[in-house]
Amino acid sequence: MCRHIAYLGPSVALGELLTEPPHSLVRQSWAPRRQRYGTVNADGFGVGWYAEGDPVPGRYRRPGPVWGDRTFADLARVVRSTALLAAVRDATEAGEDGEAAAAPFAAGRLLFSHNGAVEGWPLSMAPLAAALPPAELLGLAARCDSALIWALVRHRLADGDALPQAVADTVLDVAAAAPESRLNLLVTDGTTIVATAWGDTLSYLSGPGPRTVVASEPYDDDPRWRTVADRTLLTATRTDVLLTPLKEPLA
């Protein structure tokens, strides 16, 4: 159910990460190597990136398969950035949201993606949704589980939680409400990456130099890629990666 990737490091063309590697995110849209659920990610895609001197990222999203979008190929060739988040989508259910349901979602300087699915959606999430202010529910970007999860993360941030804590606690809340959910979340603010491995694959690559990539699966066969254990919170900068076990919610 989707593949995603985030990058922090020296300025690179988007294509160096998203189109050129032998197992790039674009290739993962039709031939993922480690995806546990689904085989084709053709229900939308998007990329968000940061321009020098502007903390608010730009985004390019579309509802169809990434391999058929020539504009994206041009954009990936010429646009450069020191931080990005991109995703290709395999929708849990057919819907009418189209581009609005394609990651990355955004709020201020933050970009967000969800790889997975909420068990029993939407009824299983009703208690968590009911705890949100009506304005936040009405402002959901799309009528999908990922959009609601993103609203829950943002609500915790507005209450003062640090980004890693907001992400971790949201995963635990959703897992308690819908225990068989797959909740691989990925968030960046352009300087830090926060991610979870919860029910699907996650890997990271550090170096060479001040450079970190976090992805659903490696885009090449570099032996420095490391697999993140399930039920783990990852917090990374350009130079450091911290892995913290996530405890199962109490039944």
Image (tube, rainbow, N blue to C red):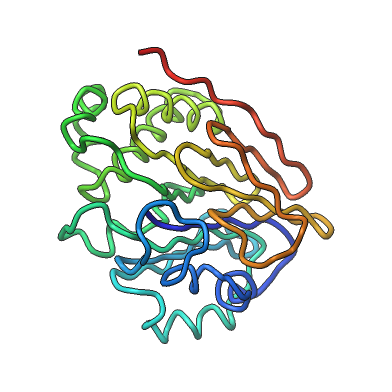
Q: Is 57 placed left or right of 213 in the picture? A: left
Q: Is 92 placed left or right of 231 in the picture? A: left
The residue at the point 35 percent across, 21 percent down is: 176
Q: Quadrant of residue 146?
A: top left
Q: Is residue 167 above or below residue 28?
A: above
Residue 90 image offset from top left, x and y in percent: 33, 60
Residue 180 image offset from top left, x and y in percent: 33, 32
Q: Furthest residue to the top?
A: 250
Q: How many marks?
A: 0
Q: Nearer the viewer, residue 165 or 29?
A: 29
Residue 115 image offset from top left, x and y in percent: 42, 49
Q: Nearer the viewer, residue 49 or 126?
A: 126
Q: Is 152 placed left or right of 120 in the picture? A: right
Q: Is residue 144 above or below residue 80?
A: above
The residue at the point 67 percent across, 62 percent down is: 82
Q: Furthest residue to the right?
A: 209
Q: Is residue 194 above or below residue 74?
A: above
Q: Nearer the viewer, residue 32 or 48?
A: 32
The residue at the point 61 percent across, 45 percent down is: 193
Q: Nearer the viewer, residue 251 or 233?
A: 251
Residue 89 image offset from top left, x and y in percent: 36, 61
